[in-house]
Image (cartoon, helix red, strand yellow):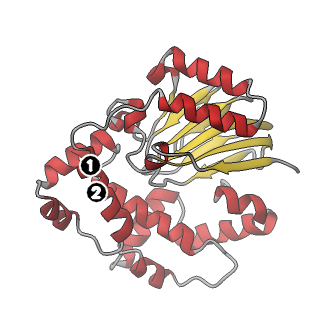
Amino acid sequence: MTYTYISHIPSPPLNAYINDLYYWRGPAPYSRLKVLPLPSSLLMVNLGDAFQVHKPNQIEPSAACKESWAVGLWDMYHIVDWPTHVRFYGIHFKAGGAYPFFRLPLSELHNQVVSLDAIWGHFAAELRERLYNAPTIQAGFALFEQLLLTRLHEAPYGFDVVQYAIEEIVGRHDTLSIRALSYDIGISQNHLGTLFKRLVGTPPKTLLRLCRLANIHYSIENPTEPVDWVKIAHQSGYYDQSHFNKDFLTFSGNSPTDYLRLRRELHMADPEHNSILRPLPTD
């Protein structure tokens, strides 16, 4: 099975809002994936066949992703049915980084996959057509950057406050108190929460929990090594094992033990794809 996956770090000022642009082309690595929530919004411009997205315990798809779409922050897992052949460009936004491009309350994208034309209108189709006709992948990245700059708006009121709070949450998720963070900034928890729902898509405490979950993902990047769940829970900011287990089950749909078993099975079957996507096969 051969495929192409390339990551591209955009130039300033885009890199202040975007972790990377990426490109995938080739056979689908899996027919169905359980996608775990992470503290990042996504944008995908599909140049191939359609994807289908299912929410937990949902038989019928909640979204059929044919052309281009935006993915908000999720606080639960979702299932993605991949087409046989994949070709798309994508964006991994930084936490809060999508707002200056979308200019709508990101709470509207919470646990949602939304067609990009519902946000950008005819520009979404123009973006897809021009990327489809790009002569090379690198030319596509350059074009993607140019077009994104036309959608980048001035940062709104409260954006600097939210970005500072995000930096604190990302850097100190294991010990940070949102109450103490609000006091340090000089605004109420309610006001900080209102800003976060609009500019990030979730309350600060939810982003904190997502950062903890991301830390857990990376702490067991190599699932063949022994795992001490008590130590991982403590290092991620959980001082109550039952709280950790409950959060983990909510986010992933699996207990920590079952999650690790499935990760090990995936790693043994295909370690190369596992390292790129960090997915979890469905039961």
Element marked by disc 1: helix
Residue that mark 1 sits on: 160
Q: Quadrant of residue 45?
A: top right
User: Looking at the figure, which quarter contains the C terminus?
Assistant: bottom right
Q: Is residue 16 shown to the viewer in this render?
A: yes
Q: Residue at x 30, y 75 (%)?
A: 175
Is residue 87 or residue 184 the one in the foreground? Answer: 184
Q: Identity of the amino acid at label 1?
A: Asp
Q: Residue at x 43, y 77 (%)?
A: 233
Kindly report the distance in space between the C-alpha atoms of the residues bearing marks 1 and 2.
Answer: 6 Å
Q: Identity of the amino acid at label 2?
A: Tyr
Element marked by disc 2: helix
Label 1 close to label 2 by CB (< 8 Å): yes
Please state the horizontal and vertical placement of residue 174, each as a whole percent of the image.
35, 74
Decide: is 114 above or below 23.
above
* Residue 260 placement, left or right of 76: right
Q: Residue at x 61, y 40 (%)?
A: 90
- Kindly identify which numbered label has been placed on residue 164: 2
Q: Is residue 59 shown to the viewer in this render?
A: no
- Kindly identify which numbered label has been placed on residue 34: none
